[in-house]
Image (cartoon, helix red, strand yellow):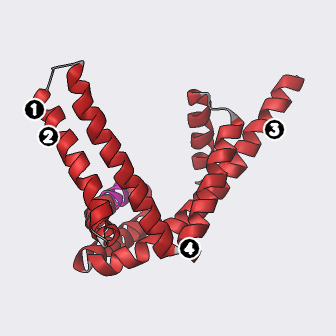
Amino acid sequence: MEQVSAEYSRIEYEELQVPWWIVVLEGVFAVIIGLFLLFKPVITTVTLVQILGIFWILGGGLSILSLLMDREKTGWKLLSGLLGIAIGALVFVYPYSPFVILSFLVVILGILSIIYGVLRLLWAFKGAGLGTAILGVLTIALGVLLLINPLIGAVFLPWIYGVSLVIGGIAALIGGIRMRSEKHISNAD
């Protein structure tokens, strides 16, 4: 299974023609942010949500400015622009907004976990095996727990993302280094 996923990610990077050093850089950033989430979860979460708020404000402003060049879908652009600016401003005005936003994300993750768990169970019944069924049940249980108490889920979410970013970052570092070594091997031939 690991070999299949490793080959799939390698094919994906090759198809995108991403240079090896960008993959390594992505891995480094993921590990750094993951470590910050693990060891300074509150400060890192607040900072990341504030960065998200800046992007919402900028995206909203750009959506409204795009109306000067393109009058198509005026209502949607204006609505999305105003909502982006309003939500982005709320992030900076309301001091507890990172935790409200995290709670909202936890609810979304809970719903997606249940859907993904059901899909895993369906795959298991179609022959994917007992491991897939167990993962499906665990994923559904995680989704239900997140929906029962989103605030507790929001408290643990930085650590969950921290661990996944560190693991994903290490995988990206290994993948980038492999891409570089494979490139040198193919150039030597």
Q: Amino acid at mark 4?
A: Leu
Q: Is residue 105 magenta?
A: no
Q: Which residues are magenta?
A: 118-126
Helix, strand or loop for disc 4 = helix
Q: Give how far apart the Cα atoms at labels 3 and 4 are.
A: 31 Å
Rendered image quadrant of residue 135: bottom left
Mark 4 = which residue? 38
Is residue 160 shown to the viewer in this render?
no
The disc, 3 or 1, on the residue closer to the chain's N-terminal end is: 1
* Left or right: residue 38 compared with residue 179: left
The disc, 2 or 3, on the residue closer to the chain's N-terminal end is: 2
Mark 2 = which residue? 79
Q: Give how far apart the Cα atoms at labels 2 and 4 are.
A: 37 Å
Q: Nearer the viewer, residue 9 or 104?
A: 104
Q: Name the residue at 33% across, 81% down.
A: 152
Q: Give how far apart the Cα atoms at labels 3 and 1 are.
A: 51 Å
Q: Residues within 10 Å of mark 4 (few under 14, many from 20)?
A: some
Helix, strand or loop for disc 1 = helix
Q: Nearer the viewer, residue 8 or 160?
A: 160
Mark 1 = which residue? 75
Q: Amino acid at mark 1?
A: Gly
Q: Nearer the viewer, mark 2 or mark 3?
A: 2
Q: Give how far apart the Cα atoms at labels 1 and 2 are.
A: 6 Å
Q: Name the residue at 26% across, 80% down.
A: 149
Q: Residues within 10 Å of mark 3 (few under 14, many from 20)?
A: few
Q: Give how far apart the Cα atoms at labels 1 and 4 are.
A: 42 Å
The disc, 3 or 4, on the residue closer to the chain's N-terminal end is: 4
Q: Amino acid at mark 2?
A: Leu
Q: Nearer the viewer, mark 3 or mark 1?
A: 1
Q: Residues within 10 Å of mark 1 (few under 14, many from 20)?
A: few
Q: Residues within 10 Å of mark 2 (few under 14, many from 20)?
A: some
